[in-house]
Amino acid sequence: MRKQKALLLFMLLLAITSSCKKEENPVPAMREKGRLSIRIGLFIQAGAVASLLKSTNAVEDLRVEIYDIGGTEVMVFERAADMPDQVELDAGSYYVVAHSNNSLPAAFENPYYYGRSEDFTLAGNGEETAVVNCELANTMITVVYSDNVVNNFTDYYTVVKTGADSLVYGASETRAGYFAPASLSVYACLTWDRGGTPAVKVLSGTIGNALARRHYEINVDALPDNGSSAISIVLDETVDSTQVIALQEGGMETGEGIPAGGLIISEIMANPAALADNEGEWLEVYNTLSYAVDLQNLVIRRDEADGHVISASVVLDPGGFCVLARSETAVDVACYVYGSSITLTNTSAQLSISNYGSDGIDGSEIFSVTYGGTGFSVPTGASLSLNPLHMNAADAQSGDWWCAAGSAYGAGDLGTPGGANDDCE
């Protein structure tokens, strides 16, 4: 009996001790919450040129993001319209971002709006209001051509480029382009008829530090031949201000700085049958870049024996083809005739395109390919043609992606000079 009483007393003491320990380590209280209201304003400030600004999404369509003060995203609303009147958050420090969720390096009719609130601290059981003012966060560019250009040139366009991205403003382009704020390059390419022969004038310049919330209107004015030329840029920032950029004719990306792989050789006619070799040889160049280039001063070379510096301005559009021919009778679409300075052997040779450098010899190589040999032999009466699915520098150097052309042209040889290549089976 005494043993049973002792056991009961021990169990009672154990229960009391366990209860005390639980009271010493209570469950942590939940963090206090506060309530946040968000107000968003949208301000269009590009010289108040509303007619040139595509209407952005309404305020209720802006994306809203809440971050803690350390930059960690804690809450997102895809549309401001989806937010409740008040948002419940843990007590702490935050900021709010709102934007139109369409940021691109360059695009037509694509204004991007962005705003960030001031940092704020939300107390437990407290209330705060965050104000986010969204403004145009990119640069707006329009291009206007003078009457001189419209009346004297048969074709014209302007390329505005930032990094690897660009927009082309054609003769009838009136839309506004929007760019991430950065240094912008401007190239205007103007074509006219010089006695039945197309001639090209290229104007170029830069906007050194294009700013957000600004509208730059590029005015292009020129006359053919040695007539006067000018590009001026009117900067609209609610007050009139004109910035005239430095102008250089022929300054488009030319024989001094085309990157490796920017141009490739896409077709080679080394052994024509309908014409003699000294009449019918040609090679085709393809522009892989997203902007136009001028081939003037580039060096084309066969092995180390034959070389030729392109002496005329030849502007090649992005994704465009240019046929460099040995004679004027080789093809109807030749954009340049190099004459007898280069001969294409019927067996094997290396063809290359290089920048001029300081003397025409030390310039950096843009592209080279060696034709001939196993899997890359030269057909008779047909060009060697690069598979149109492999129009890049890496694949163009391999004979695996070349084949004999099958389409007839000119006097009866096979090839697609100046146009898209035949498919390789």
Image: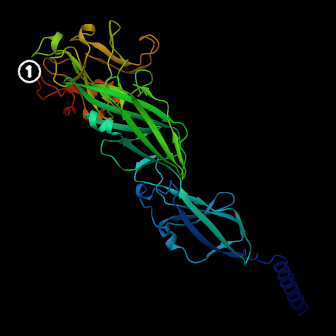
Question: Percent from the top left, x then y, of residue 74?
Answer: 61, 65
Farthest bottom residue in view? 1
Q: Quadrant of the N terminus?
A: bottom right
**Residue 328 position (above or below residue 420):** above
Residue 357 figure quarter: top left
Q: Quadrant of the C terminus?
A: top left
Q: How many marks?
A: 1
Residue 204 figure quarter: top left
**Which of these two is toward me, 97 or 75?**
97
**Residue 332 position (above or below residue 214):** above
**Which of these two is toward me, 176 or 70?**
176
> Would residue 289 be visible to someone looking at this image?
no
Q: In the figure, is residue 386 to the left or right of 140?
A: left
> Would residue 313 be visible to someone looking at this image?
yes
Question: Percent from the top left, x then y, of residue 288?
Answer: 35, 32
**Which of these two is toward me, 150 or 204?**
150
User: What residue does disc 1 label?
Assistant: 411
For badge 1, the amino acid type reads Ala
Farthest top residue in view? 305
Residue at disc 1, secondary structure = loop
Q: In the figure, is residue 144 to the left or right of 123?
A: left
**Which of these two is toward me, 195 or 94?**
195
Question: Percent from the top left, x then y, of residue 229?
Answer: 39, 30
Residue 395 figure quarter: top left
The residue positioned 53% from the left and 41% from the top of the image is: 182
The residue carrying pointer 1 sits among few (fewer than 14), some (14 to 19) or many (20 or more) residues within 10 Å by Cα, namely few
**Residue 96 position (above or below residue 398):** below
Question: Percent from the top left, x then y, of residue 276?
Answer: 13, 11
Q: In the figure, is residue 379 to the left or right of 57?
A: left
Query: Coloring scheme of the render?
Result: rainbow
